[in-house]
Amino acid sequence: MHRFNRKGEVFPIMKKRTQNINMAKKVSEAADIPSHLISGTPMISIIDNNLIHIENYGNIVEFREDILSFKSKRGITVIKGTDFEITSFTINNLDLKGVFKSVELDYEGDKK
């Protein structure tokens, strides 16, 4: 997969994404701000086995009683379990209640 700049030159998306992540890390360190807030990387906090708090979740791809999948700037995250209920929902944060069995990460750029 490639992107084109204004001059029509081709450059790989992964290189650009890596540069953006590195820049976000530098800015967050200089400003003493958590890097996931600047880079848009999701942060998933699992509290016991019945509550998950997600920051920077991006777009919800699928939600059912047994699955939540969302696409972020890094890739796709899939959470599987039972009795899912979204208890809090804002543009950047989501709280999910239920019984969790797995969290799967399919992040672009992490493949070698």
Image (cartoon, rainbow, N blue to C red):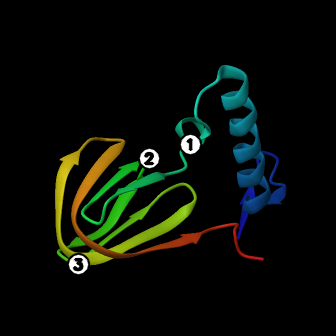
For the residues labelled 1 and 2, say whether their Cβ atoms are less than 8 Å apart: yes
Amino acid type of the residue tagged 3 in the rendering:
Asp
Query: For the residues marked 2 and 3, what is the alpha-carbon distance in whole angstroms?
Result: 21 Å
Which of the 4 image quarters holds residue 48? bottom left
Which residue is denoted by mark 1 in the rendering? 36
Q: Is residue 1 left or right of residue 99?
A: right
Q: What crowding class fits label 3: few (fewer than 14 Cα within 10 Å), some (14-19), or many (20 or more)? A: some
Between 26 and 58, the one lying in front of the other is: 26
Q: Is residue 55 left or right of residue 24?
A: left
Name which residue lies at 71% across and 44% down: 20
Above or below: residue 53 compared with residue 38: below
Q: Is residue 6 left or right of residue 103?
A: right
Which residue is denoted by mark 3 in the rendering? 66
Which of the 4 image quarters holds residue 12? bottom right
Between 81 and 59, the one lying in front of the other is: 81
- Residue 67: image location, x then y, percent: 28, 75
- Residue 4: image location, x then y, percent: 75, 56
For the residues labelled 1 and 3, say whether their Cβ atoms are less than 8 Å apart: no
Amino acid type of the residue tagged 2 in the rendering:
Asn
Mark carried by residue 56: 2
Tell me which numbered mark, 1 or 3, is placed earlier along the sequence: 1
Quadrant (top left, top right, bottom left, bottom right) of the N terminus = bottom right
Query: For the residues marked 1 and 3, what is the alpha-carbon distance in whole angstroms?
Result: 27 Å
Query: For the residues marked 1 and 2, what is the alpha-carbon distance in whole angstroms?
Result: 8 Å
Which of the 4 image quarters holds residue 23? top right
> Which of label 2 and label 3 is nearer to you?
3
Name which residue lies at 49% across and 52% down: 42
Task: Give SS at disc 2.
Answer: loop
Tell me which numbered mark, 2 or 3, is placed earlier along the sequence: 2
